[in-house]
Image (tube, helix red, strand yellow):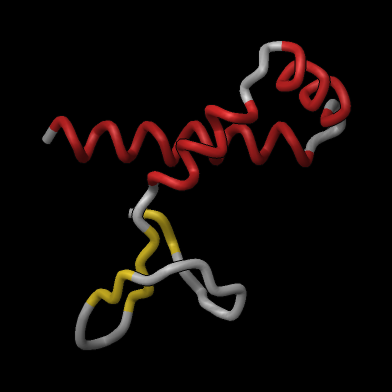
């Protein structure tokens, strides 16, 4: 259960961050991310997520593909 909660927390953090980065105050958010040096940590977090493509028969784990409709799980 702990792993599931950790994964959900990471996904929620990424979602909130994306919303902030697309909002009216995005320039301020960019400056704060740079000021607190959070970008390397966010890159690591993104890289550690497992990206899966859902198919009718199974779950396929694969690398980055811009043509893929994937979601972090």
| Residue 5, above or below 62 | above
Q: Which residue is found at the position 33% from the left and 75% from the top?
A: 54
Q: 63 or 56, which is in the foreground? A: 63
* Outermost left residue: 1
* Outermost top residue: 36
Q: Which residue is found at the position 71% from the left and 32% from the top?
A: 20
The quadrant holding residue 21 is: top right
Q: Which residue is found at the position 34% from the left and 55% from the top?
A: 50
Quarter of the image containing the C terminus?
bottom left
**Coordinates of residue 12 in the picture (x, y in percent):** 45, 36
Q: 68 or 48, which is in the foreground? A: 48
| Residue 50, above or below 57 | above
Please indicate whether residue 31 sits to the left or right of residue 40 in the image. Answer: right
| Residue 50, above or below 6 | below
Q: How many marks?
A: 0
The quadrant holding residue 48 is: top left
Q: Which residue is found at the position 52% from the left and 77% from the top?
A: 68
**Coordinates of residue 27 in the picture (x, y in percent):** 88, 27
Q: 25 or 31, which is in the foreground? A: 31
Please indicate whether residue 24 sits to the left or right of residue 48 in the image. Answer: right
| Residue 72, above or below 7 | below
Please indicate whether residue 4 sits to the left or right of residue 67 in the image. Answer: left
* Outermost bottom residue: 57
The quadrant holding residue 1 is: top left
Please indicate whether residue 43 sits to the left or right of residue 39 in the image. Answer: left
**Coordinates of residue 69 in the picture (x, y in percent):** 51, 74
């Amino acid at each position: 259960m702990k792993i599931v909660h950790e994964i959900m927390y990471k996904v929620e953090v990424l979602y909130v961050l994306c919303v902030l980065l697309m909002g009216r105050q995005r320039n301020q958010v960019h400056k704060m991310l740079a000021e607190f040096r959070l970008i390397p940590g966010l890159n690591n977090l993104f890289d550690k997520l497992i990206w899966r493509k859902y198919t009718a028969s199974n779950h396929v784990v694969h690398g980055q593909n811009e043509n893929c409709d994937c979601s972090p799980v």
